[in-house]
Amino acid sequence: MKLTSPDFKHQEFISKTFTCLGKDINPALEIHDIPANAQSLALIVDDPDAPGKTWVHWVVTDIPVVPRIEKDSVPGVQGYNDFGRQDWGGPCPPSGVHRYFFKLYALDVKLNLPPGRTKAQVEQAMQGRILAQSELIGLFTKKG
């Protein structure tokens, strides 16, 4: 499975549109080579460069098995991010260049978790259910 975006390339900068300095909407994502037996997709977006801890920007489960997640969309059941919200929280680093990891999982079940689960709760629920996974990394800094 491979995850790409028409809005930014792997290891390149994410447009301000998708950040706290712009419209703060999620970028489009394209999913290639999803396993045929996948029953759902899950997505976690986080920033390991945040001060103090890995900052969670988006948690989504029970995404239908589709080849594309549209820009500015709610593709599945949203969990809590570290902004205390159940939606996309775009890049907004306090300083420097940060990396944003878009981690996509193809699962052999639909998780059926209630809205508002945390990243840790989703990761626990996915244990033993992951058929394939892929990662896309975008960069962002408030300067420049």
Image (spheres, rainbow, N blue to C red):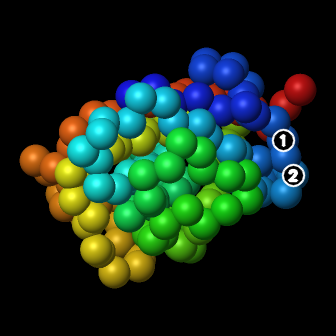
Q: Residue furthest bottom?
A: 114
Image coordinates for residue 57, horizontal then vertical, percent: 55, 54
- Determine which residue is flagged by label 2: 22
**Badges 1 and 2: C-beta atoms under 8 Å apart?**
yes
Seen from the viewer's position, the closer of residues 92 and 76 is 76
Q: Residue at left 68%, top 44%? A: 28
Q: Residue at left 52%, top 57%? A: 58
Residue 106 sits in which quadrant?
A: top left
Q: Quadrant of the C terminus?
A: top right
Q: CA distance from mark 1 to mark 2?
A: 5 Å
Q: Amino acid at mark 1?
A: Lys
Residue 13 position (above or below residue 55): above
- Determine which residue is flagged by label 1: 16
Q: Considering only order in the chain, which callout, 2 or 1, is on the residue closer to the N terminus?
A: 1
Secondary structure at badge 1 equals helix
Residue 60 sits in which quadrant?
A: bottom left
Residue 44 position (above or below residue 49): below
Q: Quadrant of the N terminus?
A: top left
Residue 73 sits in which quadrant?
A: bottom right
Residue 116 position (above or below residue 25): below
- For label 2, the crowd category at 10 Å Cα-Cα, with few meaning under 14, some 14 to 19 and many 20 or more, is few
Is residue 98 among the parts visible in the rendering?
no
